Amino acid sequence: MLAAAGRGGVTFDRSWTFRRDDDSPDLMVEVTRLAGESDTTQTCGKHAPEMCPETFKSELSALLRDAHRSNVGFDRAWTFRCADGSDLMVEITRLAKR
């Protein structure tokens, strides 16, 4: 999904906030571009389709809700290191209720 978003012009080094009226937690997702180390990278997303910014946000929202329903923990970070220039860190943080 990240590779498709990158190919479709989604800007990273950004954050998105998702607030819902249902039982889903309020979450913030940050995607940060990392400095790459070319000798430790691997190809990923080479054949990914393009995804526009609106579709990315919609798909990300659906993924987060499904993850919550499946008891996936948040307040976590993942690193994706790829040879196509999309070395990214994704952080998902549960926000305090207002």
Image (cartoon, grey):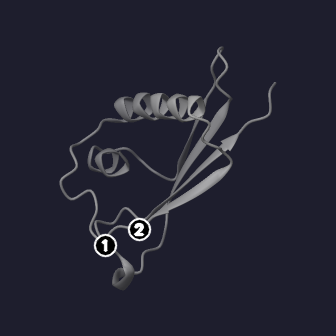
Q: Assess whether mark 1 and mark 2 are in contact (beta carbons under 8 angstroms).
A: yes
Of 59 and 9, the residue lying toward us: 59
In the drawing, what numbered circle is on residue 81? 2
SS of the residue at dot 2? loop
SS of the residue at dot 1? loop
Q: Which residue is drawn at 46% across and 35% down?
A: 60
Of 17 and 23, the residue lying toward us: 23
Q: Which residue is drawn at 21% across and 44% down?
A: 49
Name the N-terminal-most of marks 2 and 1.
Answer: 1
Q: Which residue is drawn at 65% across and 35% down?
A: 27
Q: What residue type is labelled 2?
A: Arg
In the drawing, what numbered circle is on residue 65? none
In the rendered image, residue 48, in percent from the top left (x then y), is placed at 22, 49
- In-image side of 3 versus 15 (left or right): left
User: Which corner quadrant holds the N terminus?
Assistant: top left
Q: What residue type is labelled 1?
A: Gln
- In-image side of 75 versus 39 (left or right): right
In the drawing, what numbered circle is on residue 42? 1
Q: Residue at x 37, y 61 (%)?
A: 86
Q: In which quarter of the image is residue 52?
A: top left
